[in-house]
Amino acid sequence: MDRSDENLLQLALQGDGASFGELTGRWQRKIYAFIYRYVGNREEARDLTQDTFTKAFENLERLADPARFSSWIYKIALNECRMRFRKQRHVTPVSLEDSSFREEQSTQLLPLSPEEALVEKEVVRVLKEVMENLPEEQRTVILMKEYQGLKFHEISEILDIPLSTVKSRMYLGLKTLRKLMEIRL
């Protein structure tokens, strides 16, 4: 039986640890991918993902609306990343090189030629550098929207900022990305 996040949360709140385990299994890959792109380090991403779900489990009773679990868990993940960043004062954000997190959107039937593969690798390298230099608030919105597939209203809720601010950060971030990519390529 496929249970909704809300059902699993209700059971977890009643003490059913297996339900929270199922919920964790459902969300762990997405949260790990977000954190990995944010911090750019596999080990750190694993630790932060574990910390995120531990904190979520410890604070389940604070989740006012079970229908908003996805926004809530992303908010916890982002806060964990930010706290780690404050402690370390350095972060290598946005790993775009690892194709294991790319959505399987490619419909290309023919393999890339060596020249095409080299160009794609260079574009990814430049994109990574450019993303690292974006202001953190713009980079975060772009990661959530473009790489995690979150909707603007979800990002607004996660970051606890107005929808218009999310959209302006996205617009400014993409505009800056485009400009810097044109300069470097």
Image: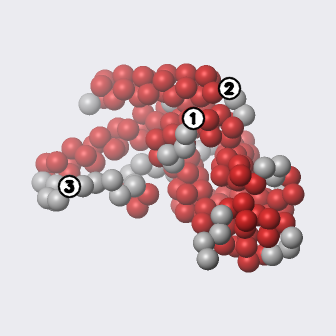
Q: Which of the pair 129/168 is nearer the observer? A: 168
Q: CA distance from mark 1 to mark 3?
A: 29 Å
Category of crowding for the residue at label 1, using alpha-carbon neighbours closer than 10 angstroms: few (below 14), some (14–19), many (at least 20): some
47 relative position to 15: left or right: left
Q: Amino acid at mark 1?
A: Phe
Q: Which of the pair 19/76 is nearer the observer? A: 19
Secondary structure at numbered mark 3? loop
Rendered image quadrant of residue 4: bottom right
In this rendering, the count of numbered labels is: 3
Q: Which mark is residue 108?
A: 3
121 relative position to 179: left or right: left
- Give the mark toward the camera: 1 or 3: 1
Q: Quadrant of the N terminus?
A: bottom right
Q: Earlier in the sequence, mark 3 or mark 2?
A: 3
Q: Is residue 41 visible?
A: no
17 relative position to 162: left or right: right
Q: Are marks 1 and 3 in contact (CB under 8 Å)?
A: no
Residue indicated by mark 1: 152
Residue at left offset 75%, top offset 54%: 66
Q: CA distance from mark 2 to mark 1?
A: 10 Å
Q: Which of the pair 124/68 is nearer the observer? A: 68
Q: Amino acid at mark 2?
A: Pro
Residue furthest front as drawn: 1
x, y percent for residue 129: 42, 37
Residue at left offset 68%, top offset 62%: 5
Q: Amino acid at mark 3?
A: Gln
Q: Which mark is residue 162?
A: 2
Category of crowding for the residue at label 2, using alpha-carbon neighbours closer than 10 angstroms: few (below 14), some (14–19), many (at least 20): few
Q: Earlier in the sequence, mark 2 or mark 1?
A: 1
Residue at left offset 86%, top offset 52%: 62
Q: Earlier in the sequence, mark 1 or mark 3?
A: 3
Residue at left offset 73%, top offset 73%: 19
